[in-house]
Amino acid sequence: MTRFTLAQFTNFLKTVDLQSYREQFQFIKTVEMDLPKQIQALRTIYEQYWQNKCALAEPVLFDDYYKVYWDEHENDIIKFWHTTGFGTNCDCFKKGLKARIYRTWVALITQIHGGYVAESVFGKNSVKMGTELDHKNVDILVVNSDGTVNLKIQIKKETHRPEIARMHKNVTSTGGIVDVYYIVPNYNEYENEPYYKIGKRKNELRDSLKEFIKFNTKGTLDRLPNGFVIFTPNAFKELL
């Protein structure tokens, strides 16, 4: 199996229409209960986007991925559907499951991109990712050339955490696992309303954008034109 390159995966993330997906799924939260292991999406996402199990020329967008997910898990999904109380004549379950899987997908492809970036820093074949590691709270495992463990990394999203922004830190360490953080500014504020329009703070940059700027003083993050926030090599170089 030939995995995607970092350039391929970055270009793929640039094509994801986050705003369209946000409008489609943001308010659909009908399937928020714990999902049985048999229909969780982690394995197929890693297979499609990290392992490139299907030997694709390019990564696929969410709707194409979701077809793969549904086809592989259809029987187990329908069994679970019958236990939820949603009628089979109602599309509430289908819409809710797709929205739920999208949220998992968009978070995980951010982590997987981080894996590609980390590999560009630590060297070819130095990074392992997958479901078993994920269940151990390890998103990125960095190994040495002899196979021994170098680093265990967990990727954490921080949407509103001013204390981290003030500290100018994107890395902490707990229990042998290094936590690497990223922060996502509000899309509408960043694109359309970066400054307060009224009141004493009129024409002042919004707090959430200040937080993003302070957090990113070391250039560990980049924001793509579509709003995707991704890691740069700087996020992992300080772990060398």
Image (spheres, grey):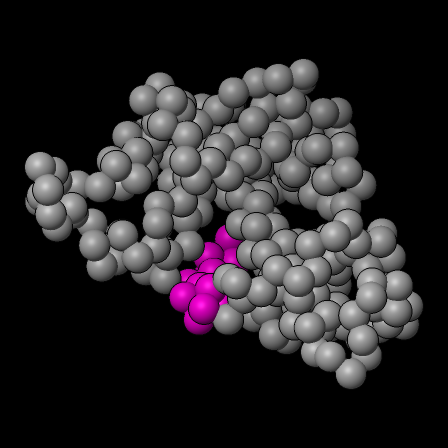
What residue is rendered at 22% in x and 59% in y?
192
| Camera-side residue of 127 and 216 | 216
**14 lies above or below 131:** below
**110 lies above or below 158:** below
Residue 59 at x, y = what percent? Answer: 59, 67
How many numbered dots are placed on residues in this image? 0
As for residue 14 lying within the magenta part, the answer is yes
Residue 146 at x, y = what percent? Answer: 74, 28
Start-end of magenta stretch = 6-23
**226 lies above or below 203:** below
Q: Classify the position of the N terminus by image quarter.
A: bottom right
Q: Is residue 32 left or right of residue 166?
A: right
Residue 87 at x, y = what percent? Answer: 81, 75
Q: Main secondary structure of the magenta part?
A: helix
What residue is rendered at 80% in x and 41% in y?
132
What residue is rendered at 87% in x and 57% in y?
38
Q: Is residue 46 left or right of residue 114?
A: right
